[in-house]
Amino acid sequence: MKAILRSLGFEKHSNYVRDYFDNTNMKSSIYMSVVVIVLEIWMIIRLTLTIIRENLQSNLKHFFEKYYSNYGILLFMACVMLFCAVRYLKGKSKRRSVILITKWVFMITCIYFGIKVSLNDYAKGEQFLTFLTMELFALCLLTWRPFTAFIISGSSFLYFYSCIDKMVAINTGEVGATVATKINFFSMWLSTMMICIASYNRIRAQALKDENLHEINTYLSKLSVEDELTGIHNMFYFRNEAEKLLNYITTDKENIVFLFFDIENFKSYNEKYGFHAGNELLIKIAHMIDDAFKNSLVSRFSDDHFVVLTSYDGVQKIIGQLSGEIKKFQNEVHLELKCGAYRPHGEETDVSQACDRARFACNSIKKHYDRTWRLYDKSLEDKFHLKQYIVNNIDTAIANGYIKVYYQPIVLTENANICGLEALARWQDPNYGLLSPASFIEILEEYRQIYKLDMYIIESVCKDYRDSTDNHKPFAPVSLNFSRLDFELCDIVGYLCETVEKYNVPREFIEVEITESALTDQHEFLPNAIKKLNECGYNVWLDDFGSGYSSLNVLKDFHFDVLKIDMKFLTGFNNNEKTRPILENIVNLTKKLKMLSLTEGVETKEQFDFLCSIGCERAQGYLFSKPVPIEILREKIEKGELKMSDKYKN
């Protein structure tokens, strides 16, 4: 039923569909108007020539009332319709009321003309083709809703029929229309209505199709410049507009600044309140930043990060106000707004690099709760260049052997003999010299390149084992540090198994350390990887226990062979009275869970003696040795500075 009503025009049109019908009618009006104008001019000329040729000037009044007036009215309305349609399509006039009135008057004039002329023709025994032609012109070339066309055609056909039904037929002398005329008349009306309905539905279907395409294109165009979640501009728009701005001669480049915003602890907010609440918060913050920097370029960079290109004057005050507003959103989660700033120098126009430097400045103050913003300066410049160097040269460093494996001994507390080694990476760079892990580990993790380093360390350790075994040199089981990203970016367990087999290394000589923080990310691949490591015969250690947000669920949900207690517990060993009972309870917990305890960061004899007294099985730290290359480790063992457990002397 609804479909039938729609096909008859009983529906509300959207603005797009309504305008589509208007445009279609105006295009049709041009064709109609031109045809009518040509025909009426021809009719006027023909009639005038007939009057002159047959010397009928004495009946000019009759011809005027009967013909000229009708031709003139129709010609005038055709000219008006043509004028209005052309202006509408050129966009010079979009007043819909004027268009509708003109269309209706033109339609009525056409039908009136058809009725007048055809009545005259019928009275003379001729066909009423002019009426039928004008009906088709007015109702089929122009598109009407079918129910409107029904009213117009029904009224005009009934009126015309009532007129001819009162007239005397020339050929029969009888009053009223003949049966054939009635049948033909009804058939013509029915055909006209069918054409009207078909025309309306054809144009309506095309209008809806075009509207759908228009909506899709509008949506895609919007996506190309707007962030889908927040509604502010996206990075595609930001980069394009920022490049234009930097290249304008009128831009005061000495007074512009790129800002990079980060909502610290936003991930915790998501975990606490859910993604829906997190998205709502992002939308609020996005519009707060957008409102705070009016007449500036503002964009969502990614996740909870935003970038702004604005004037440097007064920017710190605005950032301070924003920071205060954002703190009002926090409940149980402590939210902090961090902002990094970069001011371009000279003729710099690289937008991506400017954003990277502002981001680098922002990252430098994360976890510093006393700082809200940081301007990129010379010290950060040096760190930034080192960061770029590390990312760009990790493959070269591995290929050329600049990455070295250093080993730090792990000793038994019962006799201080070496029972294990931790493999640590050092980068001996020809340009920067010796780089500590703190210089490159986090950077490689940030750029998702850490797996390359860890795979290299695995092979280097296996090579060292094979060399030590073949040459009858001492070597102890080695613990390898695996990043969470190793499990995500590659099959690190599979690679470990392949490499161990390649160098014929007993699996008890390889142990895997996984940091506690990695297990709080709740990714399924980590539990599966730990289970696989256990099944393959590798010991798995929980590294850095207590370094951050400790969760006993980690101990409950996963099987670990060794609990490695973070060195921070020994910081302030002599001054903090809580340290000793906490350590003692952790060690007792490991015994109940049938795990070995290992404490790192041991630097004094007093600390070592305490660990022995509470039953901690293993220790590691500078008291015994700092990380050293394998050659130096062997020298220390040969000199007696370090003692290897008998089972590992080879």
Image (spheres, grey):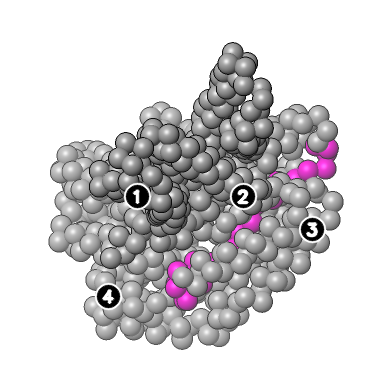
What amino acid type should be assigned to the residue bearing mark 1? Answer: Gly
For residue 401, side relative to residue 93 (left or right): left
Residue 261: x percent and y percent? 64, 56
Residue nearest the viewer, comparing 436 with 10: 10
State yes or no: discs 2 and 1 in contact (Cβ < 8 Å).
no
Say if 190 sits above or below 593 in the image: above
Disc with the residue nearer the chain's start (4 vs 3): 3
On whether residue 274 falls in the magenta region, the answer is yes
Say if 61 sits above or below 342 in the image: above
The residue that label 4 is drawn on is 557
Nearest to the eye among marks 3 and 1: give it: 1
- In 3D space, how far apart are the residues under numbered discs 4 and 2 (Cα atoms)? 78 Å
- In 3D space, how far apart are the residues under numbered discs 1 and 4 (Cα atoms)? 101 Å
Nearest to the eye among marks 1 and 4: give it: 1
- In 3D space, how far apart are the residues under numbered discs 2 and 1 (Cα atoms)? 36 Å
What amino acid type should be assigned to the residue bearing mark 4? Answer: Asp
